[in-house]
Amino acid sequence: MSKEPLVYINGEYYPKSKAAVSVYDHGFLYGDGVFEGIREYDGIIFMLREHIDRLYDSAKAIMLEIPMTKEEIINAVVETLRRNELRDAYIRLVVTRGVGDLGLDPRKCKNSNVIIITEPALTLYSKEAKLKGISLIISSVRRDRVDATTHQIKSMNYLNSILAKLEAINAGADDAVMLDDRGFVAETTSTNIFIVKNGIIATPPPTTGALPGITRAFVMRLAKRLGYHVEEREITPFELITADEVFVTGTGAEILPVTKIAGRTVGDGKAGKITLRLMERFEKECRDPANGVKVYPD
Ligand code: PXG
């Protein structure tokens, strides 16, 4: 039998089958907690510091104290990967409010729980599937407002996204675009979205309630370095449907072309030129030690 993966919980390592938190944890009872999804490519944890910064920002927004320094968390992520001997992994870092009573008062939760799960990286999409692109519906479920449970906070409450995902599944599409409460494009259920029109790249701002994605920020910088004009601005559903190219970005998805939106074919129905160029560059950049934290010494 192959060795069971180890899961980090509050400084201890537990075999996967024994890794558990209490049913009184407010993360379970109320979705009261924050998380990050992170990728390791060839022994490099891509953009780890940026993910940790965002974790602390999310925690600050919900007044959740993380009982470790950023450096301690980085070391714990590195150690978990080493113990599991992983070079290409998906990392789920979760901080929950911890055990409380059945009321929702967070003051009853004295100790937050810090959990690090690492798994071999799944290839979500084959190369052909990636090039074929994905189909999106435009969901009737609006992204939560910035003055409510905005996705600027990467919290454990994903029902807003899950409702839209269910709608996509029921419609036979791969995923759903979510609009903000004014009707502007925000993002998909778990990726940021970009359009290309006449060679100019645009993506919606976080004021739509979209998560300020780490991949999004990286791709914006990369595109600028390659000489493209990149705008962060409001995008209407009309602009989305009539774009030359559309692609989504995320830790799991990386960069994925979108070839169908709400039944309309995007561009010529294939991955666009600029999208392909960014995908190609991204594949190299995510393995560059300059863009992450090394897990193993040379
Ligand atoms: N928007 C939302 C709502 C997200 O949850 C992104 C955008 C992309 O952000 P990053 O920082 O990953 O570029 C996310 C990502 C997964 C997965 O398996 C990803 C997320 C949540 C759950 C699963 O890719 N968040």
Image (cartoon, rainbow, N blue to C red):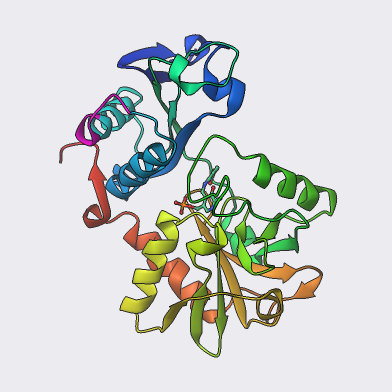
Q: Could you tell me residue 48's position as x and y percent?
A: 31, 45
Closer-to-camera residue (62/125): 62
Query: Where, quadrant-wise, is the C terminus in this rendering?
Result: top left
Which one is in front, 171 or 90? 171
Question: What count of labels does the image hold?
Answer: 0
Name the residue at 44% across, 62% down: 216
The residue shown at (44%, 30%) is 94
Residue 224: quadrant of the picture? bottom left
> What x and y, as percent, mark residue 148?
58, 47
Q: Which of 236 and 171 is in front in this view?
A: 236
Instruction: Give the residue furthest to the bottom.
Output: 198
Classify 272 as above or below 191. below
Specify whether 297 is left or right of 223: left
Q: Is 34 rendered above or below residue 20? A: below
Extreme residue in the right direction: 171
Taking 268 as reference, is 155 left or right? Answer: left
Q: Note whether 197 is above or below 95 in the view shown.
A: below
Question: Would residue 291 be visible to someone looking at this image?
Answer: yes
For the point 49% across and 67% down, the residue is 205
- Answer with the quarter of the image where residue 65 lies: top left
- Specify whether 198 is left or right of 82: right
Q: In the orientation shown, which residue stands out farthest toward the left?
A: 298
Region in magenta:
66-72
Residue drawn at the location 31% of the way across and 77% of the way down: 225
Q: Is residue 198 magenta?
A: no
| Residue 280 horizontal side relative to residue 187, left or right | left
Q: Can the viewer see residue 4? A: no
- Residue 247 in the image: x percent, y percent? 57, 68
